[in-house]
Structures are given as C-alpha cells and as structure tokens.
Image: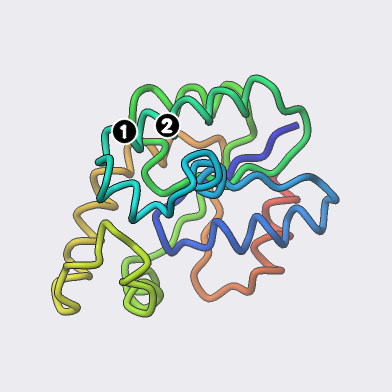
Amino acid sequence: MIISLIGYMGSGKSHISKVLSQKLNLKLIDLDKEIILKNKMSIPEIFEKRGEIYFRKEERALLEEILNTEKDCILSLGGGTPSYYNNIDLITQKSESIYLRTSVGTLTERLLKQKQKRPLIAKIPDEDLPEFIAKHLFERQVYYGQAKYTVGTDAKTPEEIVAEIISVI
C-alpha cells in the first residue's frame, strides 16, 4: 500500500511522513527530494532557471513513475502537486491519500520562519502572508478535499497525527 500525504506547504508533510515511515517501517519517498536529485538543483534553482512549468512537468513524470512502480511506501508530495494536470486523480486511484489540514494561522506561523526556502512566498511581505495563504488554500481546497482521508493537524503533536493516520487507514 502506498500512503500519500498531501497538504499546503508548512502543513507538516515532510516531518509526518518521516515519523509515519519509521512507525510503519515503510520506505519514505519525498517527491520534492526526488526532483532535486534528478535535476541536481534545489527547487528554488529549478524555478529560477527552468521555470514553474518545467518543474510541474518533472513533478508529474516522477509522481506517475513512483505510483506505477512502488508497492509499499510513504509518499510525501509537494503542496502544489495535487493541483496540476490530473495529479489528484492519479494520487487517489493509486494510493491511500491523506490531506493534512492545517489552519491559515498555523501555516502563517510556520512559514514566516521558512520564507527564504520557499520560492512561492519568498518575496511576499510578512504582513501579506496570511492573506496569500488563505487565497491559495482556498484555490487548492478543491484538490485537497478529494483525498480519501483528512486529518487535522492544528495543536497536535506529530505522534498524535501519525496515530490518527494509522487509525483511519
């Protein structure tokens, strides 16, 4: 079984996927890390040198490859992955998809600390970040909401979130 984690940047996909993979003793695949390895560039570099369209095509190709070849693993997806092409259909057909739902307040708090590592928000003034996140989350909700399961993450420890994921699957 492939368990895929989706959600907005800052929702904890990378951290939760690590804890979950250790708890279930399953291989962890982080889609963003796979893109970085294949391209030998960081994601901000890919966006800067090749553009978002190139990045999204690479993301789609690797997503398809992983979902068609892997059997048992935890798959951590980028925040935008479900929103492009028909990725969400592929994700829900070929994996147990879990949406890590996180509030705008929690996301803002986390992302303010990581802005420079996030090409999508790096140039947004701090005071405009909550509104940007809220709008973006609203646009992506139509995709995130198609996940088979939703797990709220606010005010929960990673261990509590992982326990909830295990109980729903």
Residue 37 - label = none
> Where in the figure is residue 130, as x and y percent of width and height?
22, 70
Q: Quadrant of the C terminus?
A: top right
> Where in the figure is residue 16, as x and y percent of width and height?
63, 60
Mark 2 = which residue? Answer: 58
> Where in the figure is residue 41, as x and y percent of width and height?
44, 50
Q: Which secondary structure lies at badge 2?
A: helix
Contact between labelled residues 2 and 1, with CB atoms less than 8 Å apart: yes
Say left or right for 149 vs 61.
right
Residue farthest to the right?
25
Colour option used: rainbow
Image quadrant in which you'd find residue 57: top left
Q: Nearer the viewer, residue 92 or 169?
A: 92
> Where in the figure is residue 6, as x and y percent of width and height?
50, 46
Mark 1 = which residue? Answer: 54
Say left or right for 28 vs 45.
right
